[in-house]
Image (cartoon, helix red, strand yellow):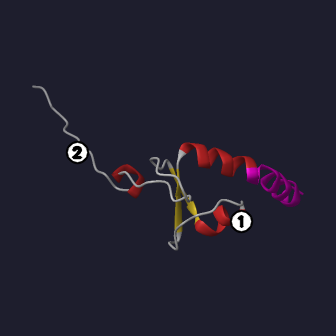
Amino acid sequence: MTHILLQEAYVLGRIDKGVKCRVSGCGREAVRSLSTEKVRSAGLNVSSSERRAYLCKEHYKEYKKKTKKDKQLEKWRYSG
């Protein structure tokens, strides 16, 4: 007797639904969602008043580069 397991694909998040990057002048497909406040503090011009900022691959990479030093300082600060 063979059992067949059927899985339905659920689309749960906005990124899976195809939301676009929220950085001004960009219309690429978003790959990450971050706090709008964090993205603005990194110097990216987010064109949305929502709580979440959706970033494409290129802008997420730029965000990571701009926040790398701050993350390292926080790590040192909290590591006894």
The image quadrant where one finds the C terminus is bottom right
* Marks 2 and 1, how far apart at CA: 39 Å
The image quadrant where one finds the N terminus is top left
Q: Amino acid at mark 2?
A: Glu
Q: Residue at x 87, y 54 (%)?
A: 76
**Closer to the camera, 12 or 34?**
34
What is the quadrant of residue 24 in the picture? bottom right
Side of 41 where 24 appears, left or right: left
Task: From the image, tell me which residue sits under label 2.
Answer: 8
Residue 71 position in % (x across, y down): 78, 54
Q: Amino acid at mark 1?
A: Ser
Side of 45 where 13 appears, left or right: left
Question: Magenta span has 69?
Answer: yes
Prevailing secondary structure class for the magenta stretch in the rendered image: helix
Q: Residue at x 20, y 36 (%)?
A: 5
Side of 68 where 50 appears, left or right: left
Report the number of numbered marks. Answer: 2
Residue 54 position in % (x across, y down): 51, 57
Task: From the image, tell me which residue sits under label 1.
Answer: 41
Q: Residue at x 44, y 54 (%)?
A: 20
